[in-house]
Image: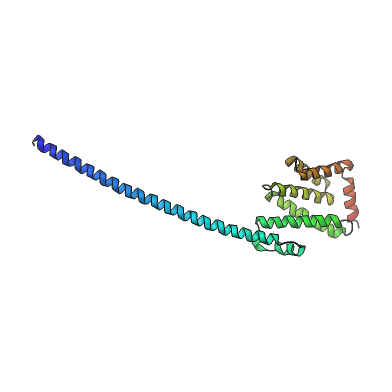
Amino acid sequence: MKAEERKALEHNALVDQIGRAYRGLKEGSWRSTAVWVGIAVVAVLIFFVFRWFYRSSEATSSHRWVKVDEVVFTEQLEQALKDTELENTPQGRLLQFKEARVKLSDGLRDLASTPTEAQKKIEDARQTYEKLLASARKMPLLHQEALLGTAKANEALGEIEKAREYYETLVKTYPNSSFAADARTRMEHLAADGGKIAEKLYKGLTTK
């Protein structure tokens, strides 16, 4: 084979290889573009789906808050606590806090006049506050209220040592809060008489 013919064949082979490479790049580029377009479409779909769920969730949450805001009287509170839509929701837990506040306040107020009924309310408040302690850990104000409420309920029911434990936990965990200041005052009263007054009061009321 002559040198010129050999060079021509080599040239043609090189041109053919370059052509194949070019076509491969074109095909690869198209596929790559298609992949990126697909990813973009999926991303857009995810965005709109998330946005829809977010807005739907936000609307539902707003509706629940409206229900909570409408609660003013005890009868409304009792009815709202039975609402299944509010179960295991932040709004439902806030209603439980309201219930515990009302029962503890009413129980402490009526302890001398109607001890049996008052003690039942205080016991209910204590149980509710105890249940709320775990779920309220991420909400400092509510967690402090649950600690203080549980402590006061225990004190009113003659459970002095338990009351001290909750007061101390509140003071150690939130030393600079107004709730802690209230807890310190109660601890000072208990320390002054060793809790005897509270115990005697509870025993006296239970014998009536």
Residue 113: x, y in percent?
Answer: 89, 59
Q: Is residue 174 above or below residue 202?
A: above
Residue drawn where x is 74% and y is 56% of the image: 98
Asked whether 119 or 59 is in front, the reply is 59
Q: For residue 91, which quarter of the picture?
A: bottom right
Q: Is residue 20 left or right of residue 113?
A: left
Residue drawn where x is 59% and y is 60% of the image: 59
Q: How is the image coloured?
A: rainbow
Q: Residue furthest top?
A: 3
Asked whether 136 or 203 is in front, the reply is 136
Total numbered labels:
0
Query: Could one spot residue 185 in this view of the protein?
Result: yes
Residue 172: x, y in percent?
Answer: 75, 40
Residue 50: x, y in percent?
Answer: 52, 55
Asked whether 111 or 161 is in front, the reply is 111
Quarter of the image for the C terminus: give it: bottom right
Quarter of the image for the N terminus: give it: top left
